[in-house]
Image (tube, coloured by chain):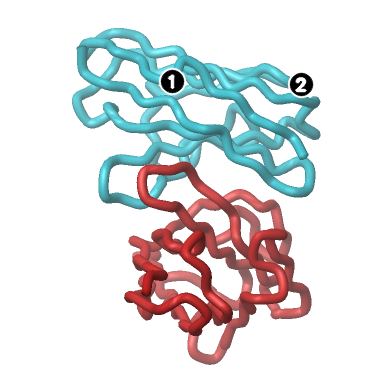
Chain colours: A red, B cyan
Amino acid sequence: QVQLVESGGGVVQPGRSLRLSCAASGFTFSSYGMHWVRQAPGKGLEWVAVIWYDGSNKYYADSVKGRFTISRDNSKNTLYLQMNSLRAEDTAVYYCARDLGAMVIFYAFDIWGQGTMVTVSS
Amino acid sequence: EIVLTQSPGTLSLSPGERATLSCRASQSVSSSYLAWYQQKPGQAPRLLIYGASSRATGIPDRFSGSGSGTDFTLTISRLEPEDFAVYYCQQYGSSPLSFGGGTKVEIK
């Protein structure tokens, strides 16, 4: 079945780095744009970043621009989020999510992973 | 940026009742690019509705979406026990995309 499984979360000190991974299965990964969306404890949803199906374009929320990098390896069906210079306000559950469209980006999300928790604290 | 305001914040209803959730946008949402998601505690969001009124794959027909421009509605015709959750609207017609603050549907 269609599935996304995140990993790599944990507790990290402010200013340090962390890399999240998202393993995809059950669909043609290379045909879909992919996103990271986060949710701070008890709060709403915040879009973080998108990468085109072929990796040709990447866009970020202003809150993470210059600190986070989204990437993908279509040969491994895996999405990544490299998070540098982490801040307390980056504490959240991070979800990877598949874009609604195939070969086109809609910025809506039809498949979500279960999420991985990132806690930034000294 | 388009700001989405969801109301009410909390909706207290009984199973079998009809739920009507509102999502109001600060500007017109282009091409009715409005989605609704359901989120249960400890779970990821689930897409219910896209394009304002199209049900996502596997979503029961008791869920329906309507609206255009700046006013959108999610209706659950008869609440089932599994429908008690938080619901978010999201617009994807203008950059940056934005989410509403959510409506919690709780058991009365």
In this picture, residue B81 sits left or right of residue A19? left
Q: Is residue A19 above or below residue B108?
A: below
Label 1 crowd (10 A; few <14 / some 14-19 / many >=20): some
Q: Residue at x 43, y 52 (%)?
A: A40
Q: Residue at x 67, y 17 (%)?
A: B71
Q: Residue at x 43, y 31 (%)?
A: B87
Residue type at the position of mark 2: Gly
Q: Chain of mark 1?
A: B
Q: Residue at x 29, y 13 (%)?
A: B12
How many marks can you see?
2
Q: Is residue B40 above or below residue B17?
A: below
Residue type at the position of mark 1: Gly
Q: Is residue A101 above or below residue B63?
A: below
Marks 2 and 1, Cα distance to the nearest angstrom?
A: 22 Å
Q: Residue furthest front?
A: A122
Question: x, y percentage for residue B76?
Answer: 39, 18
Question: x, y percentage for residue A82?
Answer: 55, 81
The residue under label 1 is B9
Which quadrant holds residue A49?
A: bottom right
Is the Cβ of the residue at disc 2 closer than 8 Å to that at disc 1?
Answer: no
* Position of the N terminus of chain B by quadrant: top right
In this picture, residue B106 sits left or right of residue B32? left
The residue under label 2 is B69
Question: x, y percentage for residue B92?
Answer: 69, 43
Q: Which label's residue is closer to the chain start, 2 or 1?
A: 1
The secondary element bearing badge 1 is classed as loop
The secondary element bearing badge 2 is classed as loop
Nearer-the-camera pick, A5 or A63: A63
Nearer-the-camera pick, B93 or B4: B4
Nearer-the-camera pick, A7 or A119: A119
Q: Chain of mark 2?
A: B
